[in-house]
Amino acid sequence: MTNLPSNKITVLCGGVGAAKLLTGLVTVTDSSEVTAVVNIADDTTFHGLHISPDLDTVTYTLAGEINPATGWGLKDEGWKAMEMVRRYGGIDWFQLGDRDLGTHLYRTQRLSEGASLQEVTEEITRAWNLSVTILPASNDPIKTVVTTDLGEEIGFQDYFVRLSHDVTVSDIRFEGIHNAKPSLGILEKIQEADAVIIAPSNPIVSIAPILEIPGIREALQDQRGRVTAISGIVGGRALKGPADRLLQELGYEPSVVGVARLYRDISSTLVIDEVDIDDKQRVEQEGIECVVTNTIMSNPKAAAALCQTVLNLGS
Ligand code: FO1
């Protein structure tokens, strides 16, 4: 085995789209040199338990344990605990499986003992024998708050799950982000990376809550030549979730050009899908290089091919 050139890769991650990319990345590179910086602004508390959806989606996916039907939670799940909660009239619109609950019980207990989210994430990652380093973007609380067009402020999970994101959004803010610090080592993971990848996650509610943590945007700007963003918008639509609608409702163009405008100051290249090839020139006019390839990760092979394309850019 030739000793592969050191290939430190840092990936900015949201939920499902990022998890799929990582499963491809670990097949084309040394996973022990991959760091996933994961959004924590979706985090919330249910039944007194701290839930970190994007951290768990990335962890469970890399562990091969993700529920393939939903893209969140664990496979081979039971729902006995939720049945009991429902019997008592408790909150049941946010489905917590019996196995998944074990993660929330452990994380909540460790946080109550004073452990940081980063320490608990390291313990959970180790328990799943993952070689990828998974880091929460911050150890400090950041909460995505959605303002609907009726002026009502709701939490992210109320927006995304309880209301099935079927409301019009007039504003999004990330409560606590101005006082939040990047997790220990994140700035170095960006500065020392041979390649930084912005996963095809929702640019508004998954990637922005990472970029807006003081210090992170500046670290990426310094590394701009090594940063590649993958558009989560394909043909003007999000592959999953409300990204296209959110872009539109918040005044951005719901297209690869709109994504280019969001990332051009921190990323030198935007990777777009073949269906958007006619927008390549418009993307480049926004001051960012544009690579056209298949970005639909319909299976691990497609995810690996996409990652290989991105890694070849840097060589
Ligand atoms: N998404 C849903 O649409 N319905 C659910 O009941 C649900 C439960 C859930 C439990 C644990 C977890 O880690 C994620 C869960 N999600 C659920 C996904 C969650 O809303 C994520 O925040 C989104 O996938 C966006 O990242």
Image (cartoon, helix red, strand yellow):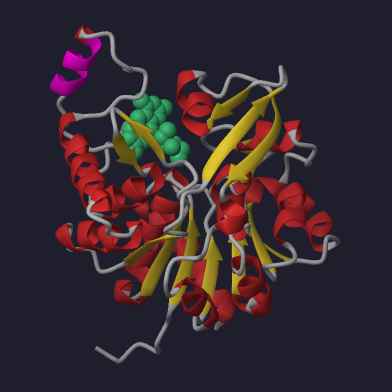
Q: Position of residue 218 (x, y in %)?
A: 66, 72
Q: Nearer the viewer, residue 282 or 75?
A: 75
Quadrant for the N terminus in the image: bottom left
Q: Position of residue 154 (x, y in %)?
A: 57, 26
Question: What residue do we see at 61% from left, 52% from top?
Answer: 208
Query: Which residue reaches farthest right?
Result: 285
Q: Nearer the viewer, residue 52 or 97?
A: 52
Please report the bounds of the magenta region as a residue range.
79-86
Q: Position of residue 252 (x, y in %)?
A: 78, 41
Quadrant for the C terminus in the image: bottom right
Question: What residue do we see at 46% from left, 59% from top?
Answer: 138
Q: Which quadrant would residue 220 be assigned to in this image?
A: bottom right
Residue 2 among magenta residues: no
Residue 84 among magenta residues: yes
Vertical order, 205 against 222 (above or below): above
Q: Is residue 72 visible?
A: no
Vertical order, 21 against 227 (above or below): above
Q: Nearer the viewer, residue 67 or 189?
A: 189
Vertical order, 4 against 101 (above or below): below
Question: What residue do we see at 19% from left, 46% from top?
Answer: 106
Q: Position of residue 200 (x, y in %)?
A: 54, 51
Q: Which quadrant would residue 76 be assigned to in this image?
A: top left
Q: Nearer the viewer, residue 273 or 108?
A: 108
Side of 271 where 141 appears, left or right: left
Total numbered labels: 0
Question: What residue do we see at 82% from left, 58% from top?
Answer: 281
Side of 77 where 222 appears, left or right: right
Side of 267 where 185 appears, left or right: left
Q: Is residue 129 visible?
A: yes
Is most of the magenta stretch helix, strand or loop? helix
